[in-house]
């Protein structure tokens, strides 16, 4: 069976792109994620990846050709046709391991630390009880799998030109979202970023509404007007995500101050990346929250890169969590690839905020597997670095713990994965079947009556 390879929507204007070069030849065997060809858009140069395993056949657009989004440029065959095998990938060294013990967070490395892979700070904060294996731990697995399956499904659809707009994806960062949100109540609030899907799913938002919003449909969580970067589900406390780097930090602080003034015990969480820790809103927001004893928890998902800029080029400190001391609030860095470690850090921080003790800064050291956005091939990252982090995959680690420590059968975990995949496909079907917003709704919600 042949599967068309199309030009996805990459440029800011959605115009034609130029194929600069093909990195594979006809008959070449490729795997999902391998780079097929390079294009030049009105915004940047991007690498287009294979969305499934197969053999390249019938290249229709040669290097130098102009193509429109949606054009078929080649095919992937399931069966070989004069296929050329790829060389084997060399073995890679054992990655750095983060070890978490009750009340302390320590770093252990079999070799010298890699640039940007900093040691976790030690903390004397008491750890919460572990996630309960028969309940919360399995639920954490279920949610993390749903996030991963959803993001990967969207990724493959995008590569086939079936997803409008761009995507900012969070594969690899699932443990940070799930570990924090598992410690929250339904009426607590979260504020997210331009990479919001994992946070909203972890908070319990409607996957149908999220997907319809990505497709710009009337049934979307923002009526089809916000797109992937502006998701929300107020029914579960997921506020509108904010695409401006760090912009949700002072907004979350304001919401938390409102809760304190109202005398309610609700908590707010602000998610942001390492790049946001260098802008004014971060410092202003944390300082104001500290002074006002606002019930807010600041969660920095440190994935080492602000878009394409490595953290070593923007700050000299090893741990962003150290900055908490400047504002007189607790700061803790945790292994963001371990959902239980994140949960153990989140519980006391949320409890402190709920009891009037003020904010905490949690730094989750994590890694995003994909580029900054789907127009970003991530060529600025070393492949060995990517392999080291993927060897610590949060879902695989949790799978091993469930099977090894709690004797949960592989068949049961596989059944969970199949069920989550069905949920993902049903959400996409819902979005595709949903109506477009009527033109008359264009100016709705623009002005307050």
Image: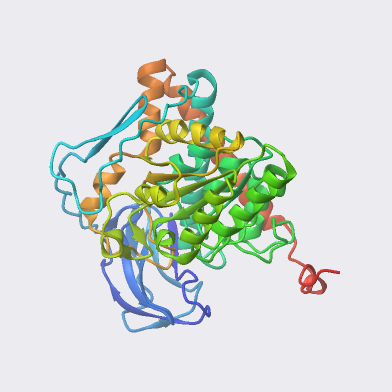
Above or below, 418 against 131 in this view is below
* Spot occupied by residue 225 in the image (x, y as percentages of width and height): 68, 66
- In the rendered image, which quarter is residue 247 located in? bottom right
- Find residue 354 and report its horizontal and vertical position in percent: 61, 36
* Residue reaching furthest to the right: 449
Question: What's the residue at 71%, 39% (across, down)?
Answer: 264
**Can you see residue 94?**
yes
How many marks on residues? 0
Q: Position of residue 226 (x, y in %)?
A: 65, 64
Task: Tell me residue 164's x, y (percent).
Answer: 57, 66
Foreground of the two, 447 or 143: 447
Q: Quadrant of residue 213?
A: bottom right
Q: Quadrant of residue 218?
A: bottom right
* Up-down relation of residue 222 to residue 118 (above or below): below
Give the left or right position of residue 168, taking residue 29 as reference: right
- Residue at x 72% of width, y 40% of height: 263
Q: Which is nearer the eye, 169 or 15?
A: 169
Whether residue 167 is visible to the viewer of this picture, yes or no, is no
Which image quarter is the N terminus in? bottom left
Figure coloring? rainbow
Q: Is residue 140 above or below residue 133?
A: below
Horizontal side of 271 relative to 22 (left or right) equals right
207, above or below 402, in the image: below
């Amino acid at each position: 069976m042949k599967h068309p390879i199309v030009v996805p929507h990459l440029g800011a204007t959605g115009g034609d792109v130029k194929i600069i070069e093909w990195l594979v030849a006809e008959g070449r065997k490729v795997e999902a994620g391998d780079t097929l060809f390079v294009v030049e858009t009105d915004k940047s140069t991007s690498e287009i990846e294979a969305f499934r395993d197969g053999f390249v056949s019938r290249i229709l657009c040669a290097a130098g050709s102009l193509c429109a989004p949606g054009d078929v440029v080649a095919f992937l065959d399931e069966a070989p046709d004069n296929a050329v095998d790829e060389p084997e990938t060399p073995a890679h060294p054992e990655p750095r391991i983060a070890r978490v013990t009750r009340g302390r967070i320590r770093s252990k490395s079999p070799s010298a630390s890699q640039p940007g892979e900093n040691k976790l700070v030690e903390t004397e904060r008491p750890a919460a009880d572990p996630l309960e294996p028969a309940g919360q731990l399995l639920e954490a697995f279920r949610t993390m799998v749903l996030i991963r399956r959803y993001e990967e499904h969207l990724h493959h659809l995008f590569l086939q030109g079936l997803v409008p707009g761009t995507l900012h994806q969070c594969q690899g960062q699932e443990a940070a979202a799930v570990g924090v949100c598992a410690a929250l109540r339904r009426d607590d609030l979260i504020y997210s970023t331009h990479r919001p899907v994992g946070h909203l799913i972890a908070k319990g938002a409607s996957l149908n509404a999220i997907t319809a919003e990505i497709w710009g449909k009337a049934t979307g969580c923002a009526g089809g007007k916000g797109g992937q970067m502006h998701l929300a589900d107020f029914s579960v406390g997921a506020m509108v995500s904010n695409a401006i780097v760090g912009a949700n930090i002072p907004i979350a602080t304001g919401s938390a101050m409102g809760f304190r003034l109202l005398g309610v015990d609700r908590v707010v969480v602000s998610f942001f990346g390492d790049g946001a820790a260098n802008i004014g809103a971060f410092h202003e927001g944390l300082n104001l929250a500290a002074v006002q004893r606002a019930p807010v928890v600041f969660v920095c998902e440190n994935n080492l890169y602000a878009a394409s800029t490595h953290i070593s080029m923007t700050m000299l400190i090893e741990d962003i969590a150290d900055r908490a001391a400047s504002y007189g609030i607790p700061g803790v860095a945790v292994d963001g690839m371990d959902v239980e470690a994140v949960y153990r850090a989140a519980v006391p921080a949320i409890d402190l905020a709920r009891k009037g003790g003020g904010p905490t800064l949690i730094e989750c050291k994590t890694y995003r597997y994909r580029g900054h956005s789907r127009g970003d091939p991530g060529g600025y990252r070393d492949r060995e670095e990517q392999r080291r982090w993927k060897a610590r995959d949060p879902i695989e680690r949790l799978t091993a713990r469930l099977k090894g420590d709690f004797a949960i059968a592989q068949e049961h975990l596989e059944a969970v994965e199949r069920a989550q995949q069905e949920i993902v496909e049903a959400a996409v079907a819902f979005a595709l079947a949903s109506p477009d917003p009527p033109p008359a709704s264009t100016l709705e919600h623009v002005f307050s009556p």
